[in-house]
Image: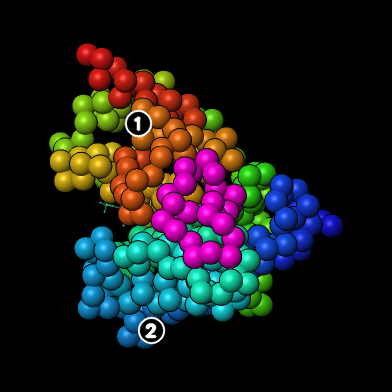
């Protein structure tokens, strides 16, 4: 089949044989994420037209104001995954603890769990800037047919079987990997179908864009300060361009296409960084590595970190491999000096 007109559904069927596990269930899981993405996309795209803007009057476990669309997206993804009886557990940025599904049903043979940030960058909603959904999929490690346990969710990122994001931007795209490269699908809203628009996405090994909230500069570790000064120095292909949207999915997506690096370091305000390991950093790291990029905490591979808690935060440096290597060099040099 001609790749350029392939739909997401056709792609999933054509490639499920390349997935090392029994892929029927995973295919159904990706399809259910596709459905939820279309439902959320519809609301995100009309957010300015109905009274769905503003906060939901509550805060999540992160202590952040929950935007109504945060709550809506969280509910839609959970509802879709539960109703289609595909997973045995869900963890979400918007849920204090993980959700065990059908845990009292001994016949419950589902083996996949999903971790997600249902609407990342939601502070951008009210100002009409692109936001995204991030998801991460694992096989459970506790016995099938028993209620999921926290250890099912506290697996290293290297154990992920699939990861992806939906970016609700000038167009809506679903970008995901099952460990055999990264492919991007663009939604045709007129017919509600995702088409393969970006086959085998790859980070350029080097780029000239850096994405960081420079307002936190004085709070950064010295190694990060030194790297940013390196980016701004007049030499060779530098100074680089600074581009920061405040939405991880959007900055990551642009950097993967054009080449670049995203940094959310530790700071005195965020001593462990701000981004969450399980449902932001690990899925984006899996995608980055599958696209020949890199993802680090400044010293070591993100996907090698052994998680200790559901909402744990880590420093995050991700993007073109040569740029991540350079940032790590500055971090190591600063540590040894
Ligand atoms: P700051 C959104 O809240 C998010 O998790 C990422 O999507 C984004 O890159 C970052 O935080 C923005 O954080 O502190 O720069 O506003």
Residue visible at 27% across and 67% down in the picture: 60
**Picture quadrant where residue 10 is located:** bottom right
- Coloring basis for residues: rainbow
Rate crowding at label 2 as few (under 14), some (14 to 19) or many (20 or more) other CA atoms within 10 Å.
few
The residue carrying mark 2 is: 49
Rate crowding at label 1 as few (under 14), some (14 to 19) or many (20 or more) other CA atoms within 10 Å.
many
Is 7 or 106 nearer to us in this picture?
106
Give the residue furthest to the bottom: 50
Is 323 or 17 nearer to us in this picture?
17
The residue carrying mark 1 is: 298
**Secondary structure type for disc 1:** loop
Could you tell me residue 257's position as x and y percent? Answer: 54, 44
Residue visible at 28% across and 71% down in the picture: 66
Mark closest to the chain's N terminus, 1 or 2: 2
Are the two marked residues, 1 and 2, in contact with CB atoms closer than 8 angstroms? Answer: no
Could you tell me residue 24's position as x and y percent? Answer: 72, 62
Could you tell me residue 284's position as x and y percent? Answer: 47, 47
Q: Quadrant of the N terminus?
A: bottom right
Is 237 or 172 nearer to us in this picture?
172
Asked if the stretch drawn in magenta spans residue 150, the answer is yes
Asked if the stretch drawn in magenta spans residue 85, the answer is no
Q: Relative to residue 300, is residue 2 drawn left or right?
A: right
Real-space CA distance between mark 1 and mark 2, rounded to the nearest whole angstrom: 42 Å
Which dot marks residue 212? Answer: none
Question: What's the magenta region?
Answer: 137-163
Q: Relative to residue 194, is residue 146 drawn left or right?
A: left
């Amino acid at each position: 089949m001609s790749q350029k007109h392939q739909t997401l559904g056709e792609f999933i069927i054509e490639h499920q044989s390349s997935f090392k596990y029994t892929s029927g269930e995973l295919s159904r899981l990706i399809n259910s994420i596709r459905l939820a993405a279309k439902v959320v996309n519809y609301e995100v795209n009309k957010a300015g037209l109905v009274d769905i803007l503003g906060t939901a009057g509550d805060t999540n476990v992160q202590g952040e104001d929950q935007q109504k669309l945060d709550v809506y997206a969280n509910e839609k993804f959970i509802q879709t995954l539960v109703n289609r009886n595909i997973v045995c557990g869900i963890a979400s940025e918007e849920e204090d603890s993980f959700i065990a599904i059908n845990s009292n049903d001994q016949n419950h043979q589902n083996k996949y769990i999903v971790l997600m940030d249902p609407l990342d960058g939601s502070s951008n909603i009210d100002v009409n800037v692109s936001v995204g959904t991030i998801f991460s999929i694992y096989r459970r490690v506790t016995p099938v047919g028993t209620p999921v346990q926290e250890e099912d969710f506290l697996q290293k990122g290297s154990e992920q079987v699939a990861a992806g994001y939906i970016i609700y931007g000038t167009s809506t795209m679903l970008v995901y990997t099952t460990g055999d490269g990264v492919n991007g699908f663009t939604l045709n809203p007129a017919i509600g179908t995702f088409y393969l628009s970006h086959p085998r996405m790859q980070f350029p090994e080097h780029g000239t864009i850096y994405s960081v909230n420079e307002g936190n500069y004085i709070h950064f570790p010295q190694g990060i300060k030194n790297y940013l000064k390196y980016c701004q120095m007049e030499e060779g292909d530098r100074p680089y361009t600074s581009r920061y949207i405040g939405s991880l999915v959007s900055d990551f997506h642009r950097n993967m296409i054009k080449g670049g690096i995203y940094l959310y370091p530790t700071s005195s305000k965020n001593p462990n960084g701000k981004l969450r390991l399980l449902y932001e950093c690990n899925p984006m790291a899996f995608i980055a590595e599958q696209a020949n990029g890199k993802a680090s905490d400044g010293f070591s591979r993100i996907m090698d970190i052994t998680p200790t808690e559901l909402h744990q935060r880590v420093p995050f440096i991700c993007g073109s491999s040569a740029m991540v290597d350079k940032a790590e060099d500055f971090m190591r040099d600063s540590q040894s000096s």
